[in-house]
Image: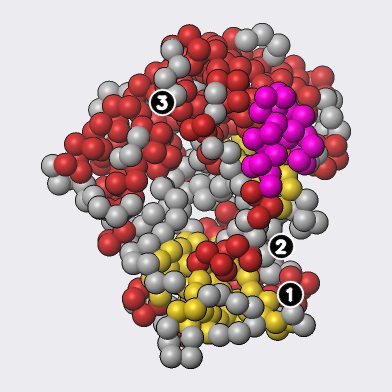
Amino acid sequence: MTAQTRDGSDPSVEDWPTAESWRERRAAGRTLRAEVPRSSHADGGVEAGRDPIGILQAQAAARVPDLIGIRHSRMAQSPFAFLRGAAAVMAADLVTTPATGPYVQLCGDAHIRNFGTFATPERNLTFSINDFDETLPGPWEWDVKRFAASLRVVAVEHGFDTPVCRELVATAVRSYRERLARYAAMSSLQVWYDLKGPDDLLQHYGTDARQQIERDIAKAHRRDHDRAVAKLTETLGDGGESATVGRGSGNVRFREDPPLQVHLASSGHDMDEVLETFNSYRASLSDDKRVLVNRYRIVDVARRVVGVGSVGTLVWVCLLEASSRRGADRIVLQVKQAQTSVLEPHLPPSAFSHDGRRVIAGQRLTQGPTDVFLGWCEGPRSGRHYYVRQLWDRKGRSDLTTMNLRSLREHATLCSWALARAHARSGDATVISGYLGRSDVFDQAVATFAERYAACTASDHRSLVEAIADGRLQGSEVI
């Protein structure tokens, strides 16, 4: 299905530079330093008169009312939880920071927990950015600064002292700069085909951490459809009672766990609406993927609460079933509402009129080989936009809370590598690398920005806790 853009033209992130030589583009990057000194990236982001609570209140108006309290209470758990849910707050802050001009396809929410493993269509495990709800073309610095700020907040929560926190962030930014320089020296196809597998992950970490990484990889391999079915569903016995989930027998349905997981009847929707929406999803797929999806029928649908920032948007899990020799062949797809990116009020509007398509286009561009079930759809009655993916497809994240300083540093530099790769795929790595150069001026400037923004995040988190306590924002005992 051809992607639809607002003006009917072919969609693109940004026109690729004209046929200038590599040296000319690198020199063009260096000239940007006169307009935006690298040291200036320490500035901005914490302006007088900021209103983070007002931004959260505005977001709540467009979300499911009975879930808003869960979102706020999840954000109130810690400053890092606040930052995870406050992409809109930081987007408004990033507008006040210096930017050189070159655009990339931004993740839009590049905090350190939005990196992890997933399976390619060939069933190989790889590591990259894994959240694209806010993706939009924009200044490359925005992703770097959100990532750096998130790392600083995590480091503070670990109890590391100020010099250690600063060194950690500067090292991660240096890794981004050095990786981008390597991509700038590659051919376009080398960049495009670059993919990191389990061996790359293990070799990146020191000997002390490899045993834990091996466990994380093994755990990711177990997070598949069988695991999703076993964890989220139950089998109804002949008398209607719950029984152990088994293949090819019984009446398998999602477990009811209000308000975190509820069926259609409890959410005010019906199966006819689901089927109409699913037909819209099928139409978004390529011919071969449509043949695959058509082998399955929808067995059950439930609304599910996921994440932190996404809470309050509509997220559905769909249990699909096909027959096979070994019995029922079941998969679980996630149908997630796609709203306007939090970046869009501050950037040119998306080329895509459909926000689900925007998310998927950004994911495919920056992530590379990805989920075979990716598609988009629209609720025919509500007009809401959604994108579709597998719920768990060997998706995995490392536990940040258990990492020592060395492990956190190694993980952060791996994330920086993935971010540099994403930006090199969608933007001009040569120009950006020419701007960054070989010195640590940019690294230290962003480390200073991250220190200031982490303090701001801690203050915003306190404001959120106070707003819930005094009733300005809704909270929830269930999180």
Where's the N terminus, which quadrant? bottom right
Residue pictured at 61% horizontal, 17% vertical:
171
Q: Secondary structure at mark 3?
A: helix
Residue pictured at 31% horizontal, 59% vertical:
67
Q: CA distance from mark 3 to mark 2?
A: 37 Å
Q: In this view of the protein, which residue sits in the foreground, 226 or 183?
A: 226
Q: Which residues are magenta?
A: 196-218
Residue 157 is tagged as 3
Image check: 256 left or right of 397? left
Report which residue position mark 1 lands on. Answer: 292
Disc on the earlier residue, 3 or 2: 3
For the residues bearing labels 1 and 2, Cβ distance under 8 angstroms: yes
- Residue 132 in picture, x, y percent from top left: 56, 48
Q: Main secondary structure of the magenta part?
A: helix
Q: In this view of the protein, which residue sits in the foreground, 457 or 70?
A: 70
- Residue 462 in picture, x, y percent from top left: 25, 31
